[in-house]
Amino acid sequence: KKLLWDILAIMFPWAEFAIIATTHLLAVASPGPDFALVLKNSLTQSKLAGLYTALGLGGGILIHVFYSLAGIGIIISQSILLFNVIKIAGALYLIWIGIQGLCSQKATPESENFNTGNNSNHNKINKLKSFKQGFVTNLLTPKATLFFLSLFALVVDPATPLWIQIIYGVEMSIATVVWFSLLAVVFGGKKLRTKLFAVKHIIERAMGVVLVGLGIKVLTSK
């Protein structure tokens, strides 16, 4: 075991890994579209919806890592048109989700099946929808695109082996899922949602305003 650890200590760039992991954790913890979406789905739907949203966000991270390692990120960074297409698509998607929240109506326990949770078909739809929302939101966020391009260009040494860079990417994806899963567990608990059920539509509308605002901010950013 000691020999294996010594080999890893020599082969693995721990200092570089620490910088990447810390930088990514700070970026993930900062409020943004991902945070707002997990909060919205956890509070207004369920803890499970928040967890699947977190999984979708982690999946989006893997795509960012893939194109950064494949060199496609260089093409994106050099093409104003392509980057703007991604930016506009991401902004419009956030605005669309936000508008759905703004249109939320006051619900009853019967219409939402809030207490029983026996509607398995409804739960399946929520899982898929929540995962897709997390995945697309993260994938089309220009901030995330710029972050990963900068991270792999400025922090990762070109001499770092590909397999180590893949480990970096997997770690960032896992860290993203873990962080947002914690948020989902905290804000998606049944006791909290039961207390907030009467104002659920107000919360959803408020989060809709936040998402629309974030979408407009992305859309108008240079």
Image: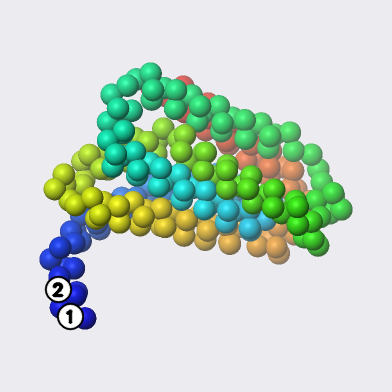
> Going 77% across and 60% down the picture, which residue do you hit?
117
Three-letter code for the amino acid on which mark 1 is drawn = Lys
**Mark 2 nearby-residue class (10 Å; few <14, some 14–19, many ≥20):** few
User: In front: 107, or 55?
Assistant: 55
Q: Secondary structure at mark 2?
A: helix
User: In front: 122, or 219?
Assistant: 122
**Eyeballing the image, is 216 above or below 63?**
above
Q: How many marks?
A: 2
Q: Is residue 137 left or right of residue 68?
A: right
> Going 20% across and 54% down the picture, which residue do you hit?
16
**Mark 1 nearby-residue class (10 Å; few <14, some 14–19, many ≥20):** few
Q: Which mark is residue 178?
A: none
Q: Which mark is residue 6?
A: 2
User: In front: 133, or 222?
Assistant: 133
Q: Is residue 21 left or right of residue 45?
A: left
Q: Is residue 219 left or right of residue 204?
A: left
Q: Which mark is residue 2?
A: 1
Q: Position of residue 106 (x, y in %)?
A: 81, 43
Q: Position of residue 152 (x, y in %)?
A: 25, 43
Contact flag, marks 2 and 1 (Cβ < 8 Å) = yes
Q: Residue furthest bottom?
A: 1
Q: Confirm whether residue 196 shows in the render.
A: no
Three-letter code for the amino acid on which mark 2 is drawn = Asp
**Eyeballing the image, is 200 above or below 9?**
above
The quarter of the image holding the N terminus is: bottom left
